[in-house]
Image: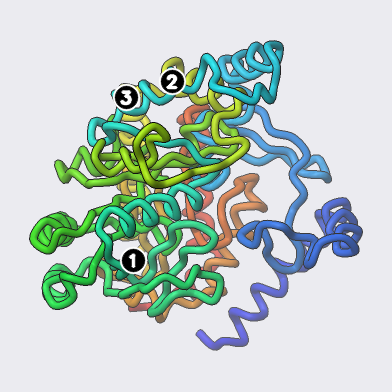
Amino acid sequence: MSDSAIDQSLAQAFQRFTEANPASRRQFEAQTRYMPGANSRSVLFYAPFPLTIAKGEGAALWDADGHRYADFIAEYTAGVYGHSAPEIRDAVVEAMQGGINLTGHNLLEGRLARTICERFPQIEQLRFTNSGTEANLMALTAALHFSGRRKIVVFSGGYHGGVLGFGAKPLPTTVPFDFLVLPYNDAQAASEQIAKHGPEIAAILVEPMQGASGCIPGRLDFLQALRNGATKVGALLIFDEVMTSRLAPNGLANKLAIRSDLTTLGKYIGGGMSFGAFGGRSDVMAQFDPRTGSLSHSGTFNNNVMTMAAGCAGLTKLFTPEAAGVLAERGEAMRARLDALCAKEDVAMQFTGVGSLMNAHFVRGEVRCVDDLAMVDGRLRQLLFFHLLSEGIYASPRGFIVLSLPLTDADIDRFAAAIGRFIGEYRALLPSA
């Protein structure tokens, strides 16, 4: 199918979207006066303009024009609880009634720290931050000072926060550390390069499943090679589980039986509030002990009572290990159902991922790294996004799909039916190989 046919279909989708969302358009145009592109978070922008979301309840969203959507992006994995869980709301209100900014240790932070350490046994001690980005920066800082080395091994396609993104090399916004960027899921290349640069390497930072690059699961042999390599050269292995900690009862790394030296967390663990944490081996974390350690770690809102209260309520009352396992199983079943549909329809489309996270890709064959997606036409992702919106489903423009606890079987049936209709409508535009 010619490029012009895809462009024509996309132009039609843009027109339908624009006509259906005048209030969102007005909101966008008004906000461009005060924010560049009316935006303070790049991932939320898409052409011709993004929807303005006015309300959320359970697993439903309403935009400024009153359209209702089933939420299949869930705040890019942070919204596992949905939008109005009473357990979280009540916990936050109760905490606020006791004072918001207490300028001291409070009654909640130790409770949440214990809950997290018991949930993820590789974390012997931890520190709170305000985001996963901060957590990764502090984990790297800890590794640099603990090892006395400067080089950090990362992987193409890796995303570890707003200032830690990688293509074939660090992105322009990435902090200027001494990075060695290696291909993801290539155990041999990783082993060779780690051995070659061993005396220089402070840390190996990796996602057990690359999230932002398309839900690309890490192969067991690859992740084990990183563990073995780090041990041999005396580097620290850091697992970024900001996303993947929700993919199994005790996190994806524990499911794979690979123990990291440090782990970073974020997103859903704060119950929907701003949250991050880094932790692991007690000898590494001892650097931050103000009684004896050499590293200072600041952050006015690290232990704010709203996040601490919401996190405790979320992990103990809603997203327990058992609930995490059930949600992961629902996600695996949904992904298998969607892949079976694509195979039945014989189209070059698949859904990669683990558990409750997945990503649509317009390609056949195994997806092992971002290079396997290099030939995918991004316009097809846009068509899928606008098609889903027209079906009352809110997902991500990059094809990222996230399950949350309040989603129903009817919501999942609706999503699968929408994918079937997408294939029916755009079959001629989909690649044949």
Residue at the (63%, 19%) spot, across then down: 92
Q: Is the residue 195 above or below the residue 223 in the image?
A: below
Q: Secondary structure at mark 3?
A: helix
Q: Secondary structure at mark 1?
A: loop
Disc 2 and disc 3: Cα gap in Å? 20 Å
Disc 1 and disc 3: Cα gap in Å? 37 Å
Q: Nearer the viewer, mark 2 or mark 1?
A: 2
Label 2 or label 3, whichever comes before in sequence order? 2
Q: Is the residue 302 above or below the residue 314 in the image?
A: below
Q: Where residue 374 sits in the image (x, y, percent)?
A: 40, 79
Name the residue type under label 2. Answer: Gly
Name the residue type under label 1. Answer: Asp
Q: Quadrant of the C terminus?
A: bottom left
The answer to whether residue 396 is left or right of residue 325 is right
Label 2 or label 1, whichever comes before in sequence order? 2
Residue at the (55%, 64%) spot, across then down: 425
Q: Secondary structure at mark 2?
A: helix
Q: Nearer the viewer, mark 2 or mark 3?
A: 2
Which residue position is annotated with label 2? Answer: 110
> Based on the displayed image, in which of its 4 quarters is residue 356 positioned?
top left
Comparing 24 with 297, the one in front is 297
Asked whether residue 366 is in view, the answer is yes
Name the residue type under label 3. Answer: Pro
Disc 2 and disc 1: Cα gap in Å? 53 Å
Q: Is the residue 62 above or below the residue 167 in the image?
A: above
Say few, some or many: other residues with alpha carbon within 10 Å of mark 2 (under 14 / 14 to 19 / 20 or more): few
Do residues under tags 1 and 3 come within 8 Å of each other at their CB atoms?
no
Furthest residue in direction front, as rendered: 292
Which residue position is annotated with label 3? Answer: 321
The answer to whether residue 56 is left or right of residue 216 is right
Which residue position is annotated with label 1? Answer: 346
